[in-house]
Amino acid sequence: MTSSQTKVYLEIVQKIRSIMDDDGLKAGDRLPSERELSARLNVGRSSVREALRALELVGLIETRRGEGTFVKNFYENGLVPLISKFLLLDEKTRQDLLEVKKLLEKDAIRILCAGTPEQTKPLSGLFLSGEADILLFHQAFFKQAVEQTKNYLLYRIWLIVSEYSFTLSGERTANDLDLYRQLYQAMEGKDEAEALRLYDALSAKIVFHT
């Protein structure tokens, strides 16, 4: 494939991704047919087919025989744990990953502290979930927090980083929810400095075996 062919091919892949976003397609939704995509993009069906194969390869879509092509939940297809075995081989990369995760979560805290009460309110329901595993609770808490920032790109990046970090084994030195309750209250009260202090205290209690 020449450089010009590669450019056109990547453009088609990107345009299909744009159609998925423009049409508001979510996991489980059916994509337009090859014929419709070909017409909308004004390219040959063979080019569309190759682009769809590329998207299927990275786990963004799946083809069901006799049904069509559907959007797939990338984060549930097992690809991340598989890749992580190769990506997270060295200590420096693992530490960098955990640092990026912390930076993203701190940014979410800052955004929510500057936001509206409606953004932080959904977090209160997590304390009624009865989740006993504190690492899973941490994951759920910040998934909700990052989602409530309404920053789609931040949310997508956090999901990927979090999925990779979750393949590392970890433990809490203190298994209680008190600091999370305090963190929620600080965020609800728009006390950014206290919320970030509490986040650092929480992070210090989580030990990952890298």
Image: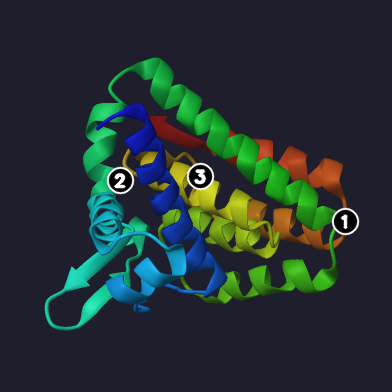
Identify residue for label 1.
190
- The circle drawn on residue 80 is 2
Q: CA distance from mark 2 to mark 1?
A: 35 Å
Q: Judge left or right: residue 70 versus residue 15.
A: left
Residue at figure coordinates x 55%, y 29% from the top left: 99
| Mark 3 neighbour class, 10 Å CA radius: few under 14, some 14 to 19, many 20 or more | few
Position in image of residue 38 (x %, y %)? 36, 67
Name the residue furthest left.
65
| Mark 1 neighbour class, 10 Å CA radius: few under 14, some 14 to 19, many 20 or more | many
Residue 57 shows in this picture: yes
SS class of the residue under badge 3? loop
Amino acid type of the residue that numbered disc 2 sits on in the rendered structure: Val
Q: Quadrant of residue 146?
A: bottom right
Question: 13 and 1: which one is in front?
Answer: 1
Q: Earlier in the sequence, mark 2 or mark 1?
A: 2
Q: CA distance from mark 1 to mark 3?
A: 26 Å
Position in image of residue 172 (x %, y %)? 45, 42
Q: Quadrant of residue 190?
A: bottom right
Which quarter of the figure is the N terminus placed in?
top left
Question: 145 and 23: which one is in front?
Answer: 23
Q: Earlier in the sequence, mark 2 or mark 3?
A: 2
SS class of the residue under badge 1? loop
Identify residue for label 3.
174
Q: Earlier in the sequence, mark 1 or mark 3?
A: 3
Q: CA distance from mark 2 to mark 3?
A: 29 Å
Which quarter of the figure is the C terminus placed in?
top left
Q: Judge left or right: residue 128 versus residue 112.
A: left
Q: Nearer the viewer, mark 2 or mark 3?
A: 2
Residue at figure coordinates x 49%, y 54% from the top left: 139
